[in-house]
Image: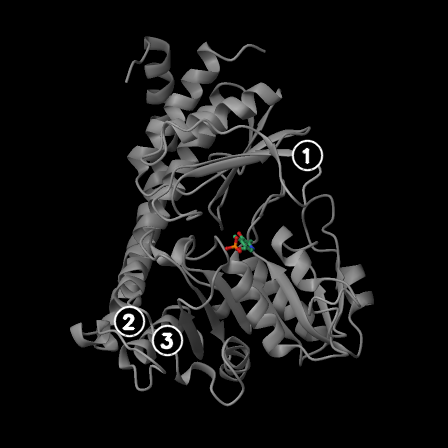
Amino acid sequence: MFMSEDLQQLIDEAEKQIEFKLKEVDKNIDFNQWKVLEVFRKHKVSDYHFNDSTGYGYNDRGREVLDQVYAEVFGAEAAIVRPHFVSGTHTLNTALFGVLRPGDHLLFITGKPYDTLHNVIGKAGDGLGSLQDYGIHYDAVELQSDGTVDWEQVNEKINKNTKVIGIQRSRGYEWRSAFTVKEIKTMSEKVKSIKPELIVFVDNCYGEFTEKTEPTQAGADLIAGSLIKNPGGGIVSTGGYIAGRKEYVELASYRLTAPGIGGEVGAMLGTTRSIYQGLFLAPHFVGQALKGSIFAASMFEKIGFTTHPNWKDRRSDLIQAIQFDHSDQLISFVQSIQKASPVDAHVVPEPWDMPGYDHPVIMGAGTFIQGGSLELSADGPIRQPYIAYMQGGLTYSHCKYAVINAVRDMLYSVKT
Ligand SMILES: *Cc1c(COP(=O)(O)O)cnc(C)c1O
């Protein structure tokens, strides 16, 4: 890679600056790696657990132990981990439909949830079988301008029908901080002091293993996430997990399959070994991605851009937002990430009109798993403020390569 002296100096400065942050990430990797390892040992995970099952998949011991391993790693009573979840959205949908009934009220307290959940929530009478179509009521309390929960509004909106409180841990595509597990603990305590029987549900996507504990160890009753993000360790090809209190996980399992069947059946379609191995690898790869984000934040701050989180902020998700001054810079950034990918590096992404978005969106991803976002990817809507969201990276070295190229492209080729 061609590198000017200026650029090399910038890299050296950034690496020196972030050295102690990377050490913190290493400590977090050790903690989570050892935690996962000890759970594997305790449950005597064995070669025969990787055997495949067919048909109904009765008595699939590998699947049963996998659920127990996940539950214990997440400090939950139970878990269901399956390739049959087609995406994070499907997993979250299954968990919500599992516990909500017509007439119940779902209240998101961290603002509107992630875009793909808008159709899950739907509208009364939409005819699509969305939550609201089934007569489940929904409301969201917007975050305050400082990114904190508006407790006055939450207090006002919790009513006798409120059953589930929704919390999104990750920033998603918002210019806000991810909620830390400690903050989620405070939220759970507060809502339960208002109404003790509430079910606290956390969208845990992008959060797993970024900290030492998970929301299920901090008052959350039910969490869900995607296996092509953090807990899949970059190698799981599809699936999702739900973890939490036993009764709620069971209700969710009835939605995934059928009442009375739940998690007792389901052939694993040859995925079991990779799901175990992915979980084993996840703490390490999440750490690599975190290091990559910290390096990116430091480098882009050095050349004058605002980042969120900044290089030294606390992190509780994988997303690194960078705010650019011009659309050309945002486009150049995403194209550089694509160019630095191991797959489809020759493809040049362009902004395009995506269904459901008011502005053209540009997406860069050259991943082994389609849409796998523990792998390095970047995207952003072409509108002011010009924010790129970068996530993942299976090796710190790859992240560095991509960021260095992106900075170089921006400094030396983008006309502004
Ligand atoms: C990715 C994500 C989802 C949805 O997952 P898909 O796999 O894209 O369906 C939901 N919530 C958050 C916070 C996410 O990051």
Position of residue 374 measured from the top left corner of the image (x, y, whole percent): 40, 47
Secondary structure of the residue carrying numbered label 3: helix
318 shown above or below 90: above
Mark 1 crowdedness (10 Å alpha carbons): few <14, some 14-19, many ≥20:
some
Where residue 273 appears, as percent x and y from the top left, is 25, 66
Local SS, label 1: loop
Relative to 58, is 388 on the left or the right?
Answer: right
Query: Residue 359 bears which disc, if any?
Result: 1
Instruction: Indicate whether 47 appears above or below 32.
Output: below
- Number of on-image labels: 3
Q: Are marks 2 and 1 in contact (CB under 8 Å)?
A: no
Looking at the image, which residue is at 49% across and 59% down? 87
Name the kind of residue labelled 3 in the image: Asp
Is 230 rendered above or below residue 16?
Answer: below
Q: Which mark is residue 67?
A: 3
Tell me: 385 left or right of 216: right
Callout in the foreground (1, 3)? 1
Q: CA distance from mark 2 to mark 3?
A: 12 Å
> CA separation, marks 1 and 3?
41 Å
Work out whether residue 26 or residue 402 is closer to the camera in this orientation and state it.
402
Q: Is residue 218 visible?
A: no
According to the image, what is the colour scheme of the structure? one colour
Q: Which residue is mark 2?
A: 39
Q: Residue 144 vs residue 184: left or right?
A: right
Which quadrant does the C terminus fall into?
top right
